[in-house]
Amino acid sequence: MKFYRYLYVGDTVRNPGRVKWKLKHHAGVQVYVITLAPSPDQLEIFHSAYLKQKFYRYHPPIVVGIAASHNEAVEIVIKMTQECLKTLGNCDLKEFLKLKANKHCHASWDSLL
């Protein structure tokens, strides 16, 4: 599993480092993850229990946000969208996340993880 360098974390998530470790090691953790969609869609929100499926071991998602509840995940996506709209003038979240990371480190997309 890969994590975005500037990971968005919900206010009610306790100990994000431990949550990341549990997600990487497929241990049980009750959070919602915000990932880059592999399709033309922008982002996906789903419960971390889905990551235990064998598919995700072979096709790990890129996690850009962690939230304690679905509502908090939606709030994070709204925050990301507002930042994107303010910065780019549109709602291309994938491009915004790439530019945000490049702005800080001038690196390729793969090094943002």
Image (spheres, rainbow, N blue to C red):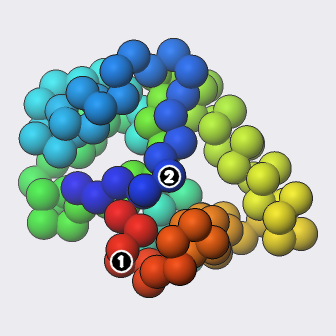
The kind of residue on which mark 1 rests is Asp
Residue 33 in the image: above or below residue 35:
above
What residue sits right under mark 2 in the picture?
A: 6
What residue sits right under mark 1 in the picture?
A: 110
Residue at the front extreme, as displayed: 105
The residue sitting at 44% across, 21% down in the picture is 13
In this view of the protein, which residue sits in the foreground, 54 or 3? 3
Q: Position of residue 97 (x, y in %)?
A: 59, 65
What element does badge 1 sit on? helix
Cα gap from disc 1 to disc 2, whole angstroms: 13 Å
Whether residue 25 is visible to the viewer of this picture, yes or no, is yes
Residue 18 in the image: above or below residue 104:
above
Give the quadrant of the C terminus.
Answer: bottom left
Q: Are marks 1 and 2 in contact (CB under 8 Å)?
A: no
34 left or right, relative to 113: right
Crowding around mark 1 (Cα neighbors within 10 Å: few <14, some 14 to 19, many 20+) is few
What element does badge 2 sit on? strand
Q: Position of residue 11 (x, y in %)?
A: 56, 21
Numbered mark located on residue 92 in the image:
none
Crowding around mark 2 (Cα neighbors within 10 Å: few <14, some 14 to 19, many 20+) is some
> Which quadrant of the figure has residue 87?
bottom right
Q: Position of residue 64 (x, y in %)?
A: 47, 52
The kind of residue on which mark 2 rests is Tyr
Give the quadrant of the N terminus.
Answer: bottom left
Please report whichever mark, 1 or 2, sits nearer to the chain's N-terminal start. Answer: 2
